[in-house]
Amino acid sequence: MKVRLMQRDSDLDLPPALAGFIAGSAGVRVLEEQETVVRRALPRHAQALTQDLELDTLFAAMAAGDRVLLNVVRQAVFASLIEPQEIVYRQQVLADCLEHPAVVRQIYDLAVEAIAGERQNLGLSKWSSPDMILRRSVGVLELFVDVLRRLRQLADEHGGAFRSEGFTELFAELSRELDDDYLRTIDGHLRILRFRAGVPISAELGKGNRGTRYVLRRSPPRKRGLRGRFFRGGRPSFTYQIADRDEAGAKALAALRDRGIDLVANALAQSCDHVLSYFRTLRAELGFYVGCVNLHEYLVAKGEPTCFPVPEVSGEPSFACRGLYDVCLSLSVTERVVGNDVTADGKSVVMVTGANQGGKSTFLRSVGLAQLMLQCGMFVAAESFRADVRTGVFTHFKREEDATMRSGKLDEELGRMSEIADDIHVGAILLFNESFASTNEREGSEIARQIIGALRETGAKVFFVTHMFELANGLFRSPMNDSALFLRAERQADGSRTFRLVEGEPLSTSYGEDLYRRIFADDGDARVVSGSD
């Protein structure tokens, strides 16, 4: 059986490290080691994205304290989809989850129960004797059959209320493959494999009177009633009884038993692994949606808007949003967050300038978060959002001074830019936040101008927040102005900020004097020099 809630044609391809983490582990230390391995399996730029967009806040809200969910949502967010139809497929599944969260959580809990139950049977190791393997496999499969039966019942009860292709196919397969006759047949086989009346084995004598051609036989039907017990009939049988203290004889008999059930034990162990793999995949794929439900419930309770974005085919740049806000900022404060309305269709560069602390960096993070959430099939923190699909999201934000003094800030910025150039593909989106401002404005503007030009040639989309007037004004007055949008952080006449962005020509000042007056309001003699900071 297949889950196929994340992808139409196949199950989610779990990295080995993530599959092991989902399987669970005994001991906090081992769990932390597995989590480290999962982190290392992420793209190289994942750490920079997490830091610049404050993604840990998003992941924590989605996971709600579940460490397995934390790693599942992290993997899903960084594994961006690049086909609009794949994104829409996930959106439809998520819409069902948002409409029926209780049922989805019940299914998720059943998958968790099955995986946890399998781990409780690890006392009988897979590397023990065939007898131990058989005992463990029978016990685990009995647990799995019970969970599958309840899973099928949920599908029968609630399947008609789900409309997405993913859930419709999942529930139909559960009802079709796990009907009552099939489950009764499995129960019957498992009862037989308990071998409560002994293990029926046939064998032949080979060279040197050694046993050969061991075959496990079907147990004869039990005779019922008094007549069957006392008058068994049939051919006479020969028996051999081992003395109570005959350890060698007991070991020899156990060896015969193991030879007879070896193939069956291995086949049953493989069946366990197959069903376990199904539950792991179900937990991982549903885990992503449970994380989305957790986040959605929080935002709705706070009164923040959400929407399903419209993914458009890559090619001509498209971008339009209404009420777009930084979801991570909203998760960190009690107040509602101010959103922005921007239309940048056909614009490959969006240059953001204006007043200090006017919401420029917040807007930049909201763009990156929205693009990531769109391309993993999530809803977006906005009233409406539309954008073309990109091959990757990259960030280049300013960093603090290197405490080790191994390199200057400009060297560090150029080094990170070089790593991005190694990883980037044609048609990506890059977010720059006050990049290359660690040198003088003329040199920094020239570096940024050349990088923007090179990125344009690769079909990349660039959002650039800067205080460098020479860079922004030069681009504004260049012949390529038609493919760029210029936004400015809005400032009221009294110096207050609205935290909204408006279209406007770059200004030669960032109004740093407003911040100076706010901080040193008591110093009436303070003199301020306006500049581009």
Image: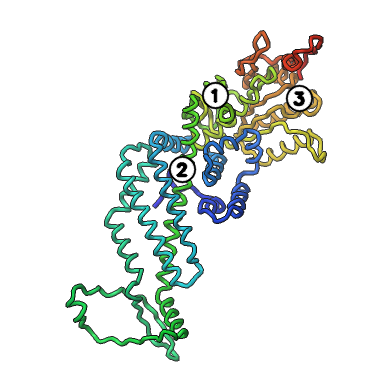
Q: Residue at x 51, y 32 (%)?
A: 313
Q: Nearer the viewer, mark 2 or mark 3?
A: 2
- Choose top left, top right, bottom left or bottom right for residue 224: bottom left
Residue, disc 3? 445
| Residue at far front of view | 244
**In the rendering, which numbered label is found on residue 6?**
2
- Would residue 463 be found to the left or right of residue 268 on screen? right
Q: Amino acid at mark 2?
A: Met
The answer to whether marks 1 and 2 mark residues whose Cβ atoms lie closer than 8 Å is no
The answer to which of marks 1 and 3 sits earlier in the sequence is 1
Q: Secondary structure at mark 1?
A: strand
Q: Is residue 508 visible?
A: no
Q: Nearer the viewer, residue 453 or 529?
A: 529
| Vertical position of residue 513 compared to residue 292: above or below | above
Q: CA distance from mark 2 to mark 3?
A: 43 Å
Q: Secondary structure at mark 3?
A: helix
| Vertical position of residue 308 compared to residue 217: above or below | above
**Image location of residue 4, percent across then percent down:** 43, 46
- Choose top left, top right, bottom left or bottom right for residue 357: top right
Residue, disc 1? 324
Q: Nearer the viewer, residue 2 or 234?
A: 234
